[in-house]
Amino acid sequence: MTIPKPVLFLSVLIVGPIAERIGEIVARLHSAGLIHGDLTTSNIMTHLSSLLSNPQMHVTLIDFGLASVSSSAEDRAVDLYVLERALVSTHPLLGVQMFRDILAAYEKQFIDAAPTLKKLAEVQLRGRKRSMVG
């Protein structure tokens, strides 16, 4: 699918920094041993500060009702997979690129990201098999 130019422009200016910030926050959460449990777009609040000379994007995760404490790469990977599915289904034009940007920031921020990202690939394969079967 080709992304239309206006959407691509929006992606570079606004969505990219939001994705980067989400990746950093999730990495910090996971590095502290916390699993959100429901990382969806409904549980991410964004706010652009009104400082015209230096606007900043603020991202806040909410609804920790399903949160848990875990150091398991599997649990972290499932957290990321839920976020990926939410992004792709809610934002079909930008979701895939946004998730790539999130993972890039996550990998930069989280020292122990490699096992999680390896496990994420396994979780994604399991999810695809499940959706093919029914």
Image (cartoon, rainbow, N blue to C red):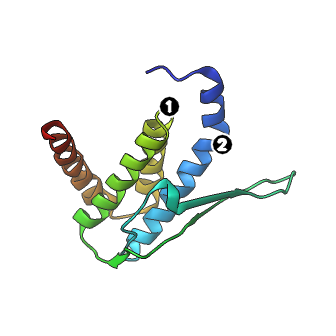
Residue at (21, 46) in percent of width and height: 127
Which residue is label 2 attached to?
A: 14
In the image, which disc is placed on residue 46? Answer: none
* Rendering coords of residue 3 (x, y %): 53, 23
Question: Disc 1 residue type?
Answer: Leu
| 87 is higher (above) or lower (below) than 45 | above
Residue at (38, 75) in percent of width and height: 67
* Rendering coords of residue 26 (x, y %): 45, 63
Q: Quadrant of the C terminus?
A: top left
- Nearest-to-viewer mark from 1 and 2: 1
Q: Element at badge 1?
A: loop
Residue at (73, 56) in percent of width and height: 56
For disc 1, the neighbor class at 10 Å (few under 14, some 14 to 19, many from 20) is some
The part of the image, by quadrant, that contains residue 6 is top right
The CA distance from mark 1 to mark 2 is 14 Å
Left or right of 12? Residue 109 is left
* Rendering coords of residue 32 (x, y %): 41, 76
Q: Quadrant of the N terminus?
A: top left
The first of marks 1 and 2 along the sequence is 2
Which residue is label 1 attached to?
A: 93
| 51 is higher (above) or lower (below) than 85 | below
**Front-most of 12 and 90?**
90
Left or right of 6? Residue 74 is left
Q: Element at badge 2?
A: helix
**Front-most of 125 and 66?**
66
| 1 is higher (above) or lower (below) than 26 | above
* Rendering coords of residue 20 (x, y %): 54, 51
